[in-house]
Amino acid sequence: MRTEDRHEDLLRALAPQVLGALVHRYGRFDACEDAVQEALLAAATQWPREGVPDHPRAWLVTVASRRLTDELRAEQARRRREDAVAAEPPPAPVADTDDTLALLVLCCHPALSPASQIALTLRAVGGLTTGEIARAFLVPEATMGQRISRAKQTIKAAGGTFALPPERELADRLRVVLHVLYLIFNEGYSATAGPDLQRADLVREAIRLTRSVLALRPDDGEVAGLLALMLLTDARRAARTGPDGALVPLAEQDRALWRREEITEGAALVTDALARARVGPYQVQAAIAAVHAEAPRAEDTDWPQILALYELLEGMAPNPVVTLNHAVALAMVRGPQAGLDLLATLDGDARLRDTHRVEAVRAHLLELAGERPAALAAYRSAARRTTSLPEKRHLEARAARLG
């Protein structure tokens, strides 16, 4: 890995920790985020030239604190409060602890709508850009930028505190927290835009944060299910791209490259959760991933079991992405036309209007059905729609094979 990439990975991993430390200390979310961004910019400029400091997190906290203190002093000076400020005791030193989880819960403040909770957490904790978050929500980037800005102001007005809430409130917040982590993982595993198919930094951060939540909630079956889903899915990462970075679909992957330790851990987590906890959507998705992982070859996949699990999931948590995957499973069990009929129910769905997903699945099912001209047209349509360069190349290659 290049030195620049190592620096970028380190800064991305440390950013939410530094932001959490500053919010814990100063309590001003917006101002703290600005200070952290300045500290990250300073690190990106100085570390390649001077080397990474022995304690990079402390370095970032110190630099960000100075930036924030300077800003606060300037603001206080404008308000002619120098004497009052001088009389205040200095803030307590920042503890050498990771406040990322507390920051995550703060971003899910009950004063925010669920959509704003998710968006703010993706921005502050996940480090996603506004454009990436907008694509995850299937809304315009300008709309998402306004939503994030309003969310910050709402937390400030509501007096959100930097502490884990009482048990009853925490249970409600965790539902949003888990969805946030799920979106962060998905953005890392299949980047919505750019030259790379995967963003390992986001995947690692999502898994790390989910482990933190599981440590807090060891008896929560859905937390365990989400972690299992992440591990079972991430286990395939090395096999998802070829030497040239090209996308390799699941059916064509070299399963010897799948990481068995992650599969073993993920399968154990979901098996235990299903045995002792109320079944939820993340557990069902993890069970589907486990069925794929158990098949030594693609042709050995237990598609009837996967179909049954997708039918269960569709009843629990219906959404267009579930229907897309359900259509593929249905095609594998009852034939491609059955899958195409189910897929047709998504035609005109506004949530998928600007994505390539429906056309990509339609192309695959049409190819299975032997309808080459229609499949070719669908592959080309999907390739035009996607913003991911590896997916675009993959879809164009599929089209070229048929053309």
Image (cartoon, helix red, strand yellow):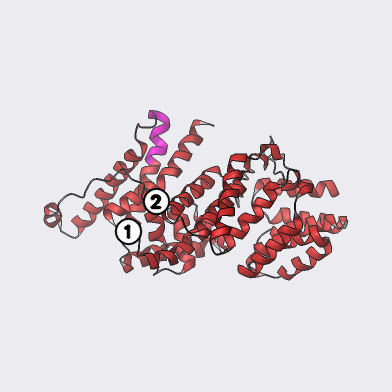
Q: Main secondary structure of the magenta part?
A: helix
Q: Circle 1: is it few (<14), some (14-19), or many (20+) Cα within 10 Å?
A: few
For mark 1, what is the residue? 163
Task: Write down the quadrant of residue 367 in the picture.
Answer: bottom right
Q: Is residue 22 magenta?
A: no
Quarter in which the N terminus is drawn: top right
Seen in the picture, residue 266 relative to 48 is either above or below; the reply is: below
Residue found 50% across the figure and 50% down from its top: 206
For mark 2, what is the residue? 100
Give the mark nearer the N terminus: 2 vs 1: 2
Q: CA distance from mark 2 to mark 1?
A: 11 Å
Residue found 73% across the figure and 61% down from its top: 307
Classify mark 1: helix, strand or loop. loop
Residue 403 screen position, x and y as percent: 86, 49
Residue 88 screen position, x and y as percent: 14, 54
Range drawn in magenta: 42-55
Classify mark 2: helix, strand or loop. helix
Q: Circle 2: is it few (<14), some (14-19), or many (20+) Cα within 10 Å?
A: many
| Residue reaching furthest to the front | 275
- In the rendered structure, find residue 109 and report the number of the disc placed on it: none
**Foreground pick, 80 / 364:** 364
Residue found 48% across the figure and 52% down from its top: 210
| Residue reaching furthest to the top | 50
Number of numbered discs visible in the structure rendering:
2
Residue type for callout 1: Ala
Residue 342 screen position, x and y as percent: 76, 67
Horizontal arrangement in the rendering, residue 377 relative to residue 285 (left or right): right
